[in-house]
Image (cartoon, grey):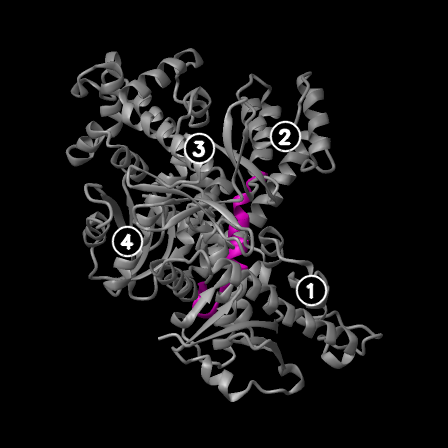
């Protein structure tokens, strides 16, 4: 039973660059050190222990770190937990709670300073803005100079005034964290979610092994490739720096007689479709190859690789905000390039042996080949294998289950050919005639793009964004596809409008609304003036829309507006929403909850998930574990989702790849 609360903030130092290598490798450095330890025991005021100057943490606080009757709080608690354990203070993750994770759960942003402002803290309760300069001075190595006596670290006694300010900064972080916690505690995180957060931290701390030889080989080959491509470009163009967009643009305009707007990725692809002379085409191809940025992921893996040749800290719990989905960190797993090469084993060996000539001879485009091999750098622990599985068409399954679109549910309960079945419903053609080889009834592409693009109230633009035109469909066909899909899925269409109406009614009446197993409500507190539009999901978890209000949108229609972190600006700002967008949030959140339950079930079976991407889990498993075993776990019924039919599909491998 919890009897006490302990809020903690620490300041540390390490020669490892935390931004590039991550917190785990940072704390593994031999020169890692905890400098300051600020804490508040219950509500007794903030105290500070100056460890760098020889002060010692009191015995009762030391004991509290491992006492299960004391819940430990911190902002981004994974950092405090890992660092303290690395510094030989034993403290189990099960006893910790993260105020940053709590804020993300409630729809706020991740940074302590930004969250303090967004939540409305008074100036004296907010994070001190001098922190960055002080951290740079005391927490990172300094350049040895004659003036500073050749030292590599700034110590407290080198600038006592700054050190006193640094101590105040550390204490103020506890004040800010506590004030945020007070406000958030009125909107609690479910226990299941705290358990999910703990599993995420343990997974990140365990990490995933990487093939160092692949990393070293890829970086070596990329250097050779860049040199050779640059030399060839100079030879073709005569430019001193063919990598310069300004120089290359001027040359291309001169050679083609056409105006070139820019040399962005999409523009280069368009230019390569034109009937240009061979020298122009080759210059554009080189530009395309030199512009391959995915090689940076090898650099990121190299910098983040720590103890045991493992990369740690690859996922951020609730990093995608609101829906609760995870975000990628360091290597950014969410946007790994796909692999199409059939001979992956051979390509990997060429890279491991730094064989540029062999790679060039066999695969031609070296940067693209290196890009495809990024996934394969992740490997299982010695004596293990990767067992990988993902949910099949989970968003299509969830939205049909939620809306009660029975024909779709029946498809997933039987043959599962959702694209063909959708085309059959849309065009009133027997499903057996909708095959890739039947030119008269080859409607599968239309069924596929409609299924992928139109579930959240999207129109022709959504089809184009999903690649409808690239599939060979004409723009004139698209409105008809939208109309036919909506007619074929009336219950999903009704769901969008019901969701929007429920949210609007809550805002207008302040009365909860229950539809489709969801509860819409307006929640707030009179003490701090917080307010949220919330949507309780079937799992019991809630989606939070902070500071909601009604206002006409750009279409002169009354709409819900709320505060969030802008995807482009990364700032706390107002945005609006509508039925289809809220439906997308809800469906993706339910899909995320299905993944969370699966991760828990995998853990309960004694298996180790090393990372997960979207709806896919990667398990570092003993050789005896079969992929069917993992797929069966993914297909198990979920108590809060009766009738939701889930299916897992996967593979086994000695490295990660896209099957």
Q: CA distance from mark 3 to mark 4?
A: 34 Å
* Residue at image mark 2: 263
Query: How far apart are the alpha carbons under marks 1 and 3?
Result: 42 Å
Specify whether 424 is left or right of 85: left
Q: In what quadrant of the picture does the N terminus appear?
A: bottom left
Please say if the residues under marks 1 and 3 sit with CB atoms less than 8 Å apart: no
Which one is in front in this view, the residue at disc 1 or the one at disc 3?
A: 3
Whichever of labels 1 and 3 marks the residue nearer the N terminus, that label is 1
Q: Residues within 10 Å of mark 4 (few under 14, many from 20)?
A: some
Kindly state the secondary structure of the residue where label 3 is placed.
helix
SS of the residue under disc 1: helix
Q: Which mark is residue 504?
A: 3
Q: Residues within 10 Å of mark 1 (few under 14, many from 20)?
A: some
- Which residue matches tag 4? 598
Front of the two marks 1 and 2: 1
Q: Which quadrant, please, contains the C terminus?
A: top left
Distance (Cα) linking label 3 and label 2: 45 Å
Disc number lying in front (4 or 2): 4
- Count of marks placed on residues: 4
Which element is circle 2 on? loop
Judging by the rendered image, the residue that carries numbered circle 1 is: 131
Q: Earlier in the sequence, mark 4 or mark 1?
A: 1
Mark 4 and mark 1: span between their CA atoms?
40 Å
Proximity of marks 1 and 2: CB atoms separated by less than 8 Å: no
Which stretch appears magenta? 290-311
Task: Tell me what residue is drawn at x 49 percent, y 53 percent.
Answer: 104
Q: Position of residue 378 (x, y in %)?
A: 40, 56
Among numbered discs 1 and 2, the one appearing first in the sequence: 1
Tell me the quarter of the picture where residue 609 sits: bottom left
- Residue 658 showing in the rendered view: no
């Amino acid at each position: 039973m919890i009897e006490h609360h302990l809020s903690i903030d620490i300041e540390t130092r390490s020669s490892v660059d935390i931004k590039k290598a991550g917190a785990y490798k940072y704390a593994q450095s031999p020169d890692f050190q905890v400098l300051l330890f600020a804490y508040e025991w219950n509500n007794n005021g903030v105290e500070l222990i100056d460890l760098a100057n020889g002060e010692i943490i009191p015995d009762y606080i030391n004991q509290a770190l491992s006492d299960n009757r004391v819940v430990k709080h911190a902002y981004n608690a994974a950092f405090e937990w890992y660092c303290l354990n690395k510094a030989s203070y034993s403290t189990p993750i099960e006893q910790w709670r993260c105020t940053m994770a709590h804020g993300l759960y409630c729809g706020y942003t991740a940074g302590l300073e930004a969250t303090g402002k967004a939540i409305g803290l008074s100036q004296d309760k907010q994070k001190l803005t001098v922190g960055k300069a002080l951290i740079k001075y005391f927490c990172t190595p300094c350049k040895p100079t004659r003036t500073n006596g050749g030292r590599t670290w700034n110590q407290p006694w080198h600038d006592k005034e700054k050190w006193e300010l640094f101590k105040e900064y550390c204490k103020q972080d506890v004040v800010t964290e506590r004030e945020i916690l007070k406000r958030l505690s009125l909107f609690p995180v479910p226990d299941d979610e705290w358990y999910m957060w703990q599993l995420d931290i343990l997974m990140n701390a365990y990490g995933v092994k990487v093939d160092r030889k692949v990393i070293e080989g890829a970086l070596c080959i990329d250097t050779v490739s860049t040199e050779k491509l640059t030399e060839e470009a100079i030879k073709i163009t005569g430019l001193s720096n063919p990598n310069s967009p300004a120089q290359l643009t001027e040359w291309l305009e001169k050679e083609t007689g056409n105006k070139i707007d820019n040399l962005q990725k999409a523009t280069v692809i368009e230019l390569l479709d034109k009937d240009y002379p061979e020298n122009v085409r080759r210059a554009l191809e080189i530009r395309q190859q030199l512009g391959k940025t995915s090689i940076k992921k090898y650099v990121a893996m190299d910098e983040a690789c720590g103890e045991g040749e493992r990369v740690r800290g690859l996922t951020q719990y609730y990093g995608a905000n609101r829906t609760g989905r995870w975000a990628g960190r360091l290597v950014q797993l969410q946007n790994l390039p796909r692999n199409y090469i059939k001979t992956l084993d051979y390509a990997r060996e060429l890279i491991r042996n730094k064989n540029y000539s062999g790679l060039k001879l066999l695969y031609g485009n070296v940067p693209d080949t290196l890009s495809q091999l990024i996934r394969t750098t992740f490997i299982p622990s010695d004596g293990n294998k990767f067992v990988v599985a993902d949910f099949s068409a989970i968003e299509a399954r969830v939205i049909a289950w939620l809306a009660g679109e029975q024909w779709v549910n029946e498809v997933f309960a039987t043959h599962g050919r959702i694209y063909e079945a959708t085309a059959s419903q849309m065009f009133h053609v027997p499903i057996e005639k909708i095959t890739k080889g039947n030119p008269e009834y080859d409607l599968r592409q239309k069924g596929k793009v409609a299924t992928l693009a139109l579930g959240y109230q999207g129109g022709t633009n959504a089809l184009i964004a999903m690649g409808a035109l690239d599939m060979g469909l004409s723009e004139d066909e698209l409105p008809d596809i939208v109309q036919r899909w909506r007619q074929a899925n009336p219950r999903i269409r009704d769901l969008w409008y019901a969701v929007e109406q429920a949210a609007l009614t809550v805002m207008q009446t302040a009365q909860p609304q229950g539809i489709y197993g969801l509860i819409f409500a307006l929640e707030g507190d009179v003490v701090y003036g917080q307010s949220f539009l919330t949507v309780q999901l079937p799992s019991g978890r809630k989606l939070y829309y902070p500071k909601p209000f009604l206002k006409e949108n750009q279409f002169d229609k009354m709409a819900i507006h709320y505060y969030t972190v802008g995807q482009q600006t990364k700032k706390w700002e107002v945005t609006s929403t509508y039925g289809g967008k809220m439906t997308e949030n809800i469906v993706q959140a339910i899909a995320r909850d299905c993944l969370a339950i699966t991760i828990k079930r995998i853990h309960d079976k004694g298996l180790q998930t090393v990372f997960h991407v979207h709806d896919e889990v990667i398990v570092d498993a003993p050789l005896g574990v079969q992929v069917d075993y993992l797929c069966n776990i993914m297909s198990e019924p979920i108590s809060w989702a009766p009738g939701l039919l889930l299916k897992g599909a996967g593979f086994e491998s000695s490295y990660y790849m896209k099957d």
